[in-house]
Image (cartoon, rainbow, N blue to C red):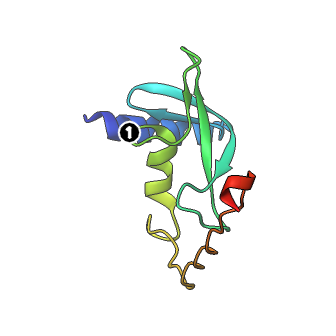
Amino acid sequence: MSTNLLDALISDALAIAGNDDSRMHNGRLWKFAGGRRCPLDWDDCSQAVFRCAKSDDWDYGEPGGPGHAECVATCPHGMHPPEVDEEPEEAAPIHHVATNEAEL
């Protein structure tokens, strides 16, 4: 049995038992610890932050971790960033300001 299948089965069993804030990922039990802004910059999404129940390691959504895996599995945008509608504004020209009489 693969680790991913076993992780999924254990996560489902935890959810059925009423422990919805825990996930098995790569053989480790991760507890939900909050959320953070969507790394793809969608305004209507966020990403879960997890903490390992055994080692107290934190996961902030890095690829390979439970937060990223959850986004890949559930992202309503297919893990694609939003399209940019506007052209970026041009920077205003820089004007030199004299700082002494020799520059005047």
Q: Is residue 7 left or right of residue 40?
A: left
Q: Residues within 10 Å of mark 1 (few under 14, many from 20)?
A: few
What amino acid type is highlighted by mark number 1?
A: Gly
Residue 32: % across, % down: 65, 36
- Which quarter shows the N terminus? top left
Q: Secondary structure at mark 1?
A: loop
> Is residue 74 found left or right of 16 in the rendered image?
left
Q: Is residue 75 above or below residue 83?
A: above
Asked if 52 appears above or below 68 in the picture, the reply is above
The spot of residue 98 in percent (x, y) is 71, 59
Q: Which residue is mark 1?
A: 64
Residue at the (52%, 26%) spot, across then down: 29
* Foreground of the two, 20 or 59: 59
* Closer to us: 1 or 74: 74
Q: Single out the residue that lies furthest toward the front.
A: 102
Classify 64 as above or below 47. above
58 vs 17, nearest the viewer: 58
Q: Residue at x 56, y 38 (%)?
A: 60
In the rendered view, would you say 102 is above or below 27?
Answer: below
Q: Position of residue 84 (x, y in %)?
A: 53, 79
How many numbered marks have been drawn onto this rendered protein structure?
1
The quadrant holding residue 52 is: top right
- Residue shown at 60% from the left, 79% from the top: 89
